Amino acid sequence: MNIFNEERITMNNFKKIGLSALAGSLAMTSAYAAEANVKGEAQAVFSSAQGNENATEASNGKGIAVDSDLHFTYSGELDMGWTVSVAHVLDTSADVTNSSTQMAVGMGSMGTVQFNHKGGASTNAIDDVLPFAYEEPWDGTTTTSEFNIFGSQLNAGSVSYKTPTFELPFGVTASGAVDYDPNASLAGAAAGGVVADAPSAEGAVIKLAHESGLTLGGGFTSVANTDAIKGESGATGYAKYSSGGLTIGYQEFYHNAAITEKGTTTRGIDTDGSGYALAYTAGDVSLSYSVQNEQTNAIGATAALEEEEVSAFQAAYTMGGMTLAASLYETDNVEGVAGVKYEETELSVSFAF
């Protein structure tokens, strides 16, 4: 007799009994039918970076990193036909405080109200919508980019209203959303808590899509004044066109960051930028090439910086739940410093389960 098989049978029976009892308990205590799902992803990345003679030694070297995320989703329907869904992402890489939660109430033709904690704002979702085979180019460089700042001020703890999708003449559909965050600091308040003298922020986005594959969209954000700082603002606009496996995109952004006290003549950092990308997918293979740049302008006592540019070539191959990816990044005028160049190569293997 194989005791391991006998143990396995016993344990399986125990699991079935336990899960059946749990399901029965949930059915008796739940006010509505609900579904729960769990999925995850794990990734290992090898990086090799090299700066030119003007770059710091800290930007040179090699390394391996491993990251994993767990995604929990719950959804159900209320008696009046509305839906409720909860999404929670647990980032297990190093610091679980990176986790985020969203709770959405779908009201049918009246749209959706969504509550966000550390992510989920509609404005932040369009910070960079260009097509990529692997990841946003700014993620693969040492630079701190303003390109992906748009909407981040509304990610601490916000509420969003999303319209339903409206069908317009000539094959056009339209949708939009507004965000409000009473605490625009990046550190969200704990449940039932507040952050003293925190500025509020609001934002809005709009999207127009045509049946031909053309999509136009944009949005704005605004942070209110406090006794300590002036408010800040941001805006972005984009256009994308998809046909078959080919997608091309162009996006511009503007960000005026508040860093000084009110009543002074010095103003915040004024940055604008743009980017374009071309991506092609054929079966399990994806390729992309992109260029993004940003310029910090002279304003008040702040001097202008050189235009920084990041170009990226990426390739990815998917085999079931496994994806192999490779990327080559080149950055000119790193952090706006003239003559500083930086190159990075990434090799990645990831699994979805």
Image: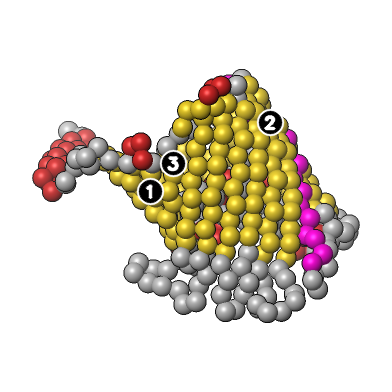
Sequence-wise, which precedes: disc 3 or disc 1? 1
Residue 257 quadrant: bottom right
Q: Nearer the viewer, mark 1 or mark 2?
A: 1
At x 49%, y 50%, the residue is: 178
At x 43%, y 48%, the residue is: 161
Q: Nearer the viewer, mark 3 or mark 2?
A: 3
> Main SS of the magenta segment?
strand
Q: Nearer the viewer, residue 250 or 204?
A: 204
Residue under numbered circle 2: 248
Q: Nearer the viewer, residue 47 or 208?
A: 208
Q: Amino acid at mark 3?
A: Thr
Q: Return the mark for residue 163.
A: 3
Q: Return the mark for residue 113.
A: 1
Sequence-wise, which precedes: disc 1 or disc 2? 1
Where residue 65 appears, x then y in whole percent?
59, 52
Residue 132 quadrant: top right
What is the magenta range?
Answer: 282-299
SS class of the residue under badge 2?
strand
Q: Does the magenta-highlighted stretch encompass residue 146?
A: no
> Badge 1: how crowded within 10 Å, few (<14), some, or many (20+)?
some
> Badge 2: how crowded within 10 Å, few (<14), some, or many (20+)?
many
Which colouring convention does the figure follow? secondary structure
Is residue 38 toward the left or the right of residue 239 in the image? left
Where residue 225 appears, x then y in whole percent?
58, 71
